[in-house]
Amino acid sequence: MKFDYLIVGAGLFGAVFANEVQRRGKSCLIIDRRKHIAGNIYTEEEKGIQVHKYGAHIFHTSDKRVWDYISQFAEFNHYINSPVAVYGDELYNLPFNMNTFSKMWNIKTPAEAKAIIASQIADLHITEPKNLEEQALSLVGRDVYEKLIKGYTEKQWGRDCKDLPAFIIKRLPLRFVYDNNYFNDPYQGIPKGGYTAIVEKMIGNIPVQLGISYRDFLAENAAKGEAADSFDKVLYTGMIDEYFDYCLGELQYRSVRFEEEVLEDCENYQGNAVVNYTERNVPYTRIIEHKHFEFGKQKDTVITREYPATWKRGDEPYYPINDETNNALYERYLELAKKEQNVLFGGRLGQYRYYDMDKVILAALTMAEEELKNVFQNN
């Protein structure tokens, strides 16, 4: 068959792009190396619970256009992200707010909390932070840093905070109100029935081939000769360095290992959807109890422990390491990408940046608009 677009990757970016161009009369074929659609937002029902198979995904946005767009495909509940953090035998609310400070210092007022933080910062005499540790200390003081930032950050990055560059943390929000709402965005929630159903609706009747990589697809397609599928353009949402056979070197990522456990006859394991573990000697960064995303009352529960991991080729890349070295290498790959005729690079891996879901949608909508505008102008 002849297609206008081959879309490499059935995640959120590819699905939004496909939905938009198909609505304007363009044909698409979607492929994905995984054996399921929806990429990292893939959810799967277990014990009547929608399990986030690749980590917690809470939708939130300040962009009404994006909210209206995603709401076409799902009804959202009123879930508010209010994680808690465990440090030893202590438990704190996140984000850092008056509930956190009241528990930490046995105080009640914002003035007391501000005074303690200001005093700790002044005692450190840090004028020009040389690393992430000094940067964080200069923003929040010693107590918040030691209990809630240091261990978690070192697990996430796999390096000591003294060995991480200061620019990774530009700010650390301190909220001097008793409010555990992690996000300031006015629109937030979890889709009833999970995220996979959203992507299914976006894709609709667009043909999809799963369990096949881009290179294998091209090889199989070439072997078919005249019977091969053809396409005018490619949207590539995989790793940009992999597309170019790592010819300039590997971009770096952090990976995650997920350890899922079904607890039968356990209605409520931890009382919250997200619990962070901030000590370095606890090997996982957080435990997700999936039923709480949708206020589940099932007699069983499903939990997932998340273990940050060093990425190596062949592993699943989750977080681009956007330090100066990697960003400079990405710019070199971007120059190669600009020379590729009829290939678009999109998404977290294709553009080597961390995207929240609302930013993925906006970027895909913008790319689709630009692409359609160019197509119709040229015709």
Image: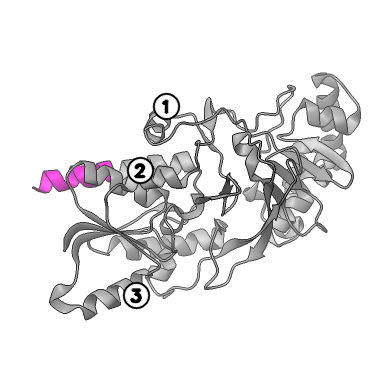
Give the residue number, with chain letter if any, for mark 2. 201
Q: Quadrant of residue 50?
A: top right
Q: Is residue 130 visible?
A: no
Of residues 220 and 241, the one drawn nearer to the viewer in this rendering: 220
Query: In the image, which is nearer the foreground, mark 2 or mark 3?
Result: 2
2 sits to left or right of 296? left
Where residue 226 appears, as percent x and y from the top left, is 13, 76
Name which residue lies at 76% across and 44% down: 269
Identify residue type, mark 3: Asp
Instruction: Check disc 2: other Cα within 10 Å, few if <14, some if 14-19, many if 20+.
Output: some
Where residue 299 appears, as percent x and y from the top left, is 69, 42
Where residue 52 appears, as percent x and y from the top left, is 57, 49
Name which residue lies at 18% across and 59% down: 3
Give the residue number, with chain letter if any, for mark 3. 216
Q: Secondary structure at mark 2?
A: helix
The span shown in magenta is 368-379
Quadrant in which the N terminus is drawn? bottom left
Q: Residue at the bottom extreme? A: 223
Identify residue type, mark 1: Lys
Of residues 374 and 120, the one drawn nearer to the viewer in this rendering: 374
Q: CA distance from mark 1 to mark 3?
A: 40 Å
Q: Is residue 260 above or below residue 289?
A: below
Q: Is residue 179 visible?
A: yes
The numbered mark at residue 64 is 1
Mark 1 touching mark 2, by CB under 8 A? no
78 sits to left or right of 144? left
Mark 2 touching mark 3, by CB under 8 A? no
Query: In the image, which is nearer the foreground, mark 1 or mark 3?
Result: 3
Q: How many numbered markers are drawn? A: 3
Identify residue type, mark 2: Lys
Q: CA distance from mark 1 to mark 2?
A: 20 Å
